[in-house]
Amino acid sequence: MSAPLVTTNSRARVLVVEDAEELRAIISRSLVADGFDVDMAVDGPAAVTTMRAAPADIVVLDIGLPGMSGVEVCRQIRTFSDAYIVMLTAQTDETDKIVGLSVGADDYMTKPFSPRELSARLNAMLRRPRAGQAPVPSAADAPGDLVVDEDAREVLVRGTTLELTRIEFDLLATLARRPRKVLSRRRLVDEVWGAEWFGEDHVVEVHVSNLRRKLDALTSHRYIATVRGVGYRFEPTSEVLTH
């Protein structure tokens, strides 16, 4: 038997939502061996009920659940929880992955996968650096067009609160702290997901797209510019505040 992964999760709680009994048991045993506390659910309604009764830090969520799809479960959980969500899919079609990320999932894994790779990804999420502290502008109490409050983890656009997932917030804060500087997708992965994360850079594109859609609903200014073949750049107005 291989040695358990070294983890810094401090007994983080994981909810495993998988209708296939054998796979659910394999994932759960592996996570427990690697230092996680694990709850299990066999379908979508049970997952939502469990998350309300005993909130988990991370949800490992199969997309192909009976009765209620994993996408709908993710959507419902996102209405009351900011837990990390990893979608599991048996499909190689990019559509499932993009849909899962678009409703608030943080990452995805395609079956079959190694349970130890899953553990490694979950630990990387838990170690992920949060947006750092930027100097507080002298006009921090002025009504800016965009305010990114890193202490409160709150974003205001023209005085209206912008509801973001934790990854969307971290992406915006990371870009906003370096106005007009191009950050590559890999750099964003390292800073937002963590240098130890080894998923695909494609997740950056999906989360940036979601972030832009939310910003566009409140302002006509395009804050995040795409630099083709490189990455993204934050384009401030004259009234952007970060603190």
Image (tube, grey):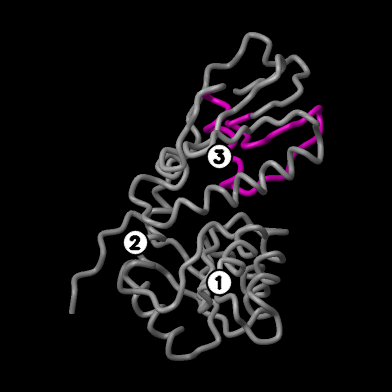
Cα gap from disc 3 to disc 2, whole angstroms: 22 Å
Please give the name of the residue rendered at 57% of the width and 81% of the height, measured from the top-left corner: 41
Cα gap from disc 3 to disc 1, whole angstroms: 26 Å
Depicted 4 relative to depicted 25: above or below: above
At label 1, the amino acid type is: Asp
Query: Dot 3, crowdedness within 10 Å: few (<14), some or many (≥20)?
Result: many
Identity of the residue furthest to the bottom in this view = 21
Q: Earlier in the sequence, mark 3 or mark 2?
A: 2
Residue 169 at x, y = what percent? 60, 40
Identity of the residue furthest to the top in this view = 138
Residue designated by label 1? 93
Q: Which mark is residue 120?
A: 2
User: Residue 67 lies in what quarter of the image?
Assistant: bottom right
Depicted 240 relative to depicted 23: above or below: above
Please give the name of the residue rendered at 52% of the width and 33% of the height, measured from the top-left corner: 174
Please give the name of the residue rendered at 45% of the width and 51% of the height, measured from the top-left corner: 201
Cα gap from disc 2 to disc 1, whole angstroms: 24 Å
**Numbered marks: total:** 3
Where, quadrant-wise, is the N terminus in this rendering? Answer: bottom left
First to last magenta residue range: 149-178
* Circles 3 and 1: CB atoms closer than 8 Å: no
Q: Which mark is residue 171?
A: 3
